Structure formats: structure tokens, C-alpha cells
Image (spheres, helix red, strand yellow):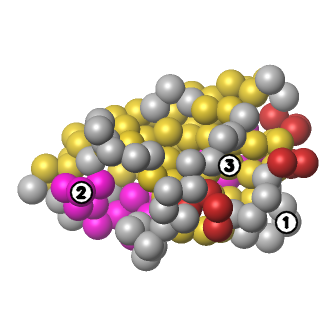
Amino acid sequence: QVQLVESGGESVQAGGSLRLSCVASGATQDIGCMGWFRQVPGLEREGIAAIYFTTTGTTKYADSVKGRFTVSRDNAKTTLYLQMDTLKPEDTAMYYCAAERASACGPLRLWVVPGSNLELSYWGQGTQVTVSS
């Protein structure tokens, strides 16, 4: 089992930056990929960034955040980060991190394609990001 705990969410002005963290514990050696999702009440969950835990650390981003957000992780597979720059009011949401076992990762594009509704093994409880204009 893997436990995930997000932090770093807060209220910020448009144009500002935040860095979210997701600390993994438990069977972290099994993790093959991790990513960030966000959800606004009443709307579908949106996958925004994902990363393979490989030497190259391949990443994938949703079009809505490409060029503004950067996902990264530490080599110990214990912490996932999301650097969010040039924040917009439409970035306001609950942000969740998720992880999947290496044997079940699949293509990263499935994490960020609209409406993919991926079923992943591990999820955090979320951290709220609010961007005011």
C-alpha cells in the first residue's frame, strides 16, 4: 500500500506562483508513475500532469497548464511536486496527487487526455488552490 499526502495549496492572486508537494509513504518502491489531477465541484476531474519514475523522468501535461506548470519528483520516489506559475482564476480547484504501480502505469497521455477517467491505485486527500483576480 502507498499513502499520499498533499500540501502547499493556498489562496493566491492571479499571476502568482505556488508549489504543491505530495509525500508518498509505504510501498513507494512499487511506484512507477505519479501525477496531479484537479477538480472543481460539479465538474469532471481533470488530469493536468504526470511523470514516469524512470531515468528520463518523462512528463506529460494537459494543454490547459502546459508552459505554466512543471511536475517533478525526487529520486527516492517519496515526493512529487507541482510548480505552478502564472496562475489564473480558472486554476482554482482541489488538487490531488495520484500514483500507480510500475506494472500498471500505461501511457502518460491517458493521464491528461480530457475525459479519460483513469482508475488509479493510490490517491491523496487533496489540497485546495484558490486564485483570485
- Determine if the magenta segment contains residue 74: yes
What kind of residue is marked 3?
Met
Q: State the residue position of label 1.
A: 55
Residue 34 image label: 3
SS at badge 3: strand
Position of 89 relative to 41 (above/below): below
| Gap between marks 3 and 2 measured at Cα | 23 Å
| Gap between marks 2 and 1 measured at Cα | 33 Å
Q: Where does residue 39 sit, x and y in percent of width and height?
A: 38, 43
Disc on the earlier residue, 2 or 1: 1
The answer, for residue 6, to whether it is visible in the render is yes
Q: In which quarter of the image is residue 27?
A: top right
Q: Where does residue 43 sit, x and y in percent of width and height?
A: 33, 45
Residue at the image position 88 percent from the left and 38 percent from the top? 29
**Which quarter shows the N terminus?**
top right
Residue at the image position 48 percent from the left and 62 percent from the top? 114
Residue 90 image label: 2
- Residue 76 left/right relative to 41: right
Q: Nearer the viewer, mark 2 or mark 1?
A: 2
The answer, for residue 8, to whether it is visible in the render is no
Disc on the earlier residue, 3 or 1: 3
What kind of residue is marked 1?
Thr
Residue closest to the eye, 40 or 11: 40
- Residue 42 left/right relative to 106: left
Q: Where does residue 16 sit, x and y in percent of width and height?
A: 24, 59
Mark 3 Cα-neighbour bin, 10 Å: few <14, some 14–19, many ≥20:
many
SS at badge 1: loop
Q: Where does residue 59 sit, x and y in percent of width and height?
A: 65, 67
Residue 94 image label: none
Q: Specify the segment rendered in magenta.
A: 68-91
